[in-house]
Amino acid sequence: MGIYKINSKIVIFGIHLHLYHIYMLRNICLIIIILALGLFSNLCANTQGHREFSPEDSLIRVEVVKIIIHANVHNRKGDFKEAFKGYDKADSISLSMDDFFLLASSKYNRGLCYYRMGDYIKYRDLLEKAIILSKKSGEGEANAQYVLGLGILYKKQGDYDNAVKFILRSLSGLEQKGDLNNMASAYTALAGIQKELINDSLAIKYYQKSLGIYKSLNDSIGISSLFNNIGFFYTKRAVFDSAIIYLRGAKVYKENLKNKSSLITTLNNLGDVYYNLNQFDSAHYYYQLSYKNAIESKNELNTVSVSNSLAELYINEKNYPEALEYLSKAQPVAELNLANKILLENYRLSSLVYSKTDNYENAFLYSKKYIELNNQIFDQEKTKGINELHFQYDTEKKDLTIKNLNEINVVKSQSLKTRNRSLIVISSFLILLIILSIFLYSAFKAKRNALDQVQLLMREKQHRTKNNLQLLSSVLSLQSLKADGETKQMAMAGEHRVQSIVLLDKLLSNEKEGDKIEITAYIQNLIEGLKEAYDHQNRIVFDLQLDSFLLAAHQATHLGLIINELITNSLKYAFDDHDNPKIIVLCKKDNSGFCNLTIKDNGPGIIKAFNLSKTTSLGLKLVKSMSKQLKGVFNIKGDDGFEFNMHFKLKS
């Protein structure tokens, strides 16, 4: 008598709504129904350990598959109530048949509902149940996919150690059954983890493995997605040549697929690359192309995002009316869709445009909106971080509870078998040890939570300090525009002192070395800002002779203020009646670990009776104070122009 049995590989392919392939659900559903109906009538299997089903049972299994597929459609649409009804029905039928394989599939897909709802604890519980049921059914091919789901969950929570462990474990099972699509997703997830850990070589290795799989499958959607991801990765690492190659490849694939929504992202990424390269014509071309596609696809959020990019480009070109037009159109759409991060950028650019066009009232208004929204976003992210910490704590607490219960059960089992007094004593000791461990663990968690709170407060303090510096700089800038005479000069001097610190903070945020900056870029940017403020006719020649080396942040702060004061002094007072003004700036690092700084102009110099220790100039007092902080030795010459020389020991 022929025994009919469902083909587990086809079912798992049809009913698992994978996190990275949700867009393929409709096609998969159609294929699985056709294949399942054709195969149920003629496939037989006598695999040892698998449950055997009658022809009637197999027909019922087809109906359960249809129910799960239909529930998945509701899941994708966000109609979770109807999705849960379908999964309840599938659970009931599967239990009545003792069909643990389909029950595992239903649990897994139910878990995806909770994942999309943000309830990661229930999602994790259902994944674990699905793994147990799949093993119990004897049809364990699905285990690898469920394990991959756990790995991706840990990645989302920032627990990269567990994420890597579970994803690598899933790869072993995926390779055995030849599930190339999920293997590609696993490698992509591993690449994302290594990118966050700044392990660039390993990230690229995993990206290339994933890309190789998609190419072997001739999967245009997967290839285009990987090209875009790798291009974005290189953009963030400022490797723009490689970024352009991959992003252009993504553009070609997405154009062939006619996927406008996905194409918009790639076009915008290309615009960002060319903007960073200061190739503004190319940036303008790709931004406009992205904007056109966003309008045609009626994608409001993409339209707003590209509008911000175009506005920033127009600001750079000093075409303020065009910039303001794009920002004005985008702002109400961003506010309506609660796109806070896009709206934050819109407020920043709007404030910048109004300040450039002397509309100080609106500039202040949007600066205030920017600060308020920025604080709101920070508070939301802080709350989200605390919730994630609670999730991690609950997960670890559950694991510890399960572990402790297992140990207690082992101890009880041994005591029942031996009924020996010595074992009772040992059991009591173990129980006391477990209780002590729980108390110690609770104390550790309390201390850890307190430390996390302190770190959150420190990050918030640093964040608010940065915002306050930027606001202070804006206020001083506006004050200098409205004031005149000595007040104007004092405001401008204060503004540039603050800007030297803001510039340092900006460079530090982009620096891989953490608390060090590349001194050449810092000095060049500092001087560019001073030239823009004081040398409106661009007649002063700067001779920069700078060594490229890393300087500790606290030393860079003092050095930047010294350079700011001395260059400002030369620009303001040295060249009133000079035909060929010139300023020389040397910053050299010698083999003994000292930095030598020279700032010299060809102006009239200083009076012979000048005494730095008795000067009343705030700027020169600041130079003396900063030199002392650097523990540097300096001298000033004033016979043939002004010349300042200083050398100080570089900190490691």
Image (tube, rainbow, N blue to C red):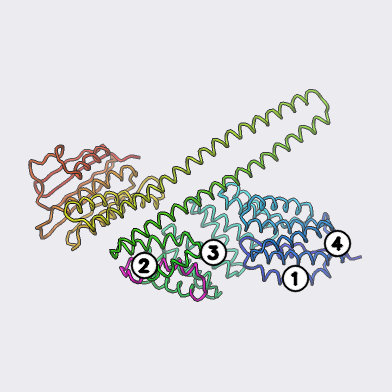
Give the residue drawn at x 69%, y 64%: 72
Left or right of 302: which side holds 573? left
| Residue 523, label in figure | none
Q: Nearer the viewer, mark 1 or mark 2?
A: 2
Label 2: few (<14), some (14–19) or many (≥20) C-alpha neighbours in 10 Å: many
Identify the residue position indicated by label 4 in the image. 53
Instruction: Name the residue rendered at 34%, 52% in the picture.
Output: 470
**What residue type is disc 4 on?**
Phe
> Disc 3 vs disc 2: Cβ atoms closer than 8 Å?
no
What distance separates the C-alpha of mark 1 from that of mark 3? 30 Å
Residue at label 1?
33
**Residue type at the position of mark 3:** Leu
Mark 2 vs mark 4, CA separation in Å: 66 Å
Few, some or many residues within 10 Å of mark 4 (<14, 14–19, 20+):
some
Q: Which residues are magenta?
A: 295-324
> In this figure, which residue is indicated by the disc labeled 3?
226
Q: Quadrant of residue 98?
A: bottom right
Ranked by sequence position, the earlier of labels 1 and 2 is 1
| Three-letter code, disc 2 | Leu
Circle nearer the N terminus (1, 3): 1
Circle 2: element type: helix
